Amino acid sequence: MPIKNRFAELLPDITAWRQDIHAHPEILFETYRTSALVAEKLTAFGCDDVVTGLGRTGVVGVIKGRTNTSGKVIGLRADMDALPIHEETGLPYKSTTDGAMHACGHDGHTAMLLGAAQYLVETRNFDGTVVVIFQPAEEGGGGGREMCEDGLMDQFKIDEVYGMHNWPGQPLGSFAIRPGPFFAATDQFEVVIQGKGGHAAKPQETVDSTLVAAHVVLALQSIVSRNADPVDQVVVSVTSVESSSKAFNVIAQSVHLKGTIRTMSDAMRDMAEARFTTLVQTTAAAYGADADISFYRGYPCMVNHEEQTDFAAKVAADVSGACAVAPLVMGGEDFAYMLEERPGAYILVGNGDTASVHHPEYNFSDEAIPAGCSWWAEIVEQRLPIGP
């Protein structure tokens, strides 16, 4: 089943929706304009029900098939939120909101799922029910978790759920997927090293918090090199070091560290947090300083279910001719919460030779739209076939 002709016909409309969403980015749960646009489109298409307000600003559309002898319900999810980044693309439809940008392609995800929803309403060539899920706050806000906590899966009786993300550097319109752990658990930390400040000419009278912080940063790398099994994936990154001193000749009273720890299993996640706490506390104590630690557990590891992954890969191969094995991704993805509640799979669609996601020059490629829409549609029509 190659790319569906209907999506070639709809491409100008879907592209216009995508570029309009791109020009009006909204961050986290503040997707009021985008959510209203989505709800308006779903209603105009003729969805059997449109529900707003799940996960604060999430939108859900219900599409009934021509028949329903299976009684099955398939969920399809797209994220809607943008990032707090100043756009530098120079596009004619660039962001009109300073400091906000669709730098991860959620505008494309939303537009593609809208296009698929229009097609599914028009054809209803399936046996069962489709629930299209438009989620806010994927970029750190946990919108997927909040939609689940609002009863998404039970309210709509969803049996399986599928998600998709564009992927720069992957051939345009191609697909890649893998079973099992796919995207990492993402935890954050803050550490305040409290020493004793003083004159830079008299270090013996101080407890140098900058020196302590430097040793803490180095010590944390031993979690990866000496505590983790070399075949397991762990990334420890200290991303911010801020001293209380702003002068050349003052030894700082305190230093503030921030960063993330990313893991691919619960066991490794627990080990990394425990070793992090021990290393920070004991390293600070060894130099006569104190360490105030804040550790925040973020998104869990996103785990694709094997049966649904095999099916998703087959559909992708039907659409594009092949489906590659995706690499492990140490970034986070809150579709993980939906996959904890229901079996399903998450796939990557190629965005071609573009800037990386989360880059100020990134742009979703509208040429990927027909392939993405076709995959959504085929997931439904092949998973919920109408009987003879």
Image: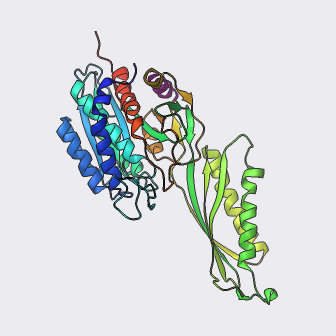
| Residue displayed at 46% across by 32% down | 173
Type of secondary structure dominating the magenta stretch:
helix
The span shown in magenta is 306-315
x then y, percent, for residue 362: 48, 50
Residue reaching furthest to the top: 388
Q: Is residue 50 above or below residue 283?
A: above
Residue 156 location, quadrant: top left
* Nearest the eye: 353 or 345: 353
Q: Is residue 24 left or right of residue 41?
A: right
Residue reaching furthest to the right: 204
Residue 8 location, quadrant: top left
Q: Is residue 359 magenta?
A: no
Q: Which image quarter is the C terminus in?
A: top left
x then y, percent, for residue 245: 64, 83
Q: Which image quarter is the N terminus in?
A: top left
* Nearest the eye: 161 or 96: 96
| Residue displayed at 65% across by 76% down | 255
Residue 211 location, quadrant: bottom right
Q: Is residue 112 above or below residue 298?
A: above
x then y, percent, for residue 228: 73, 48
Q: Is residue 38 left or right of residue 253?
A: left
Q: Is residue 282 visible?
A: no
| Residue displayed at 80% across by 90% down | 202
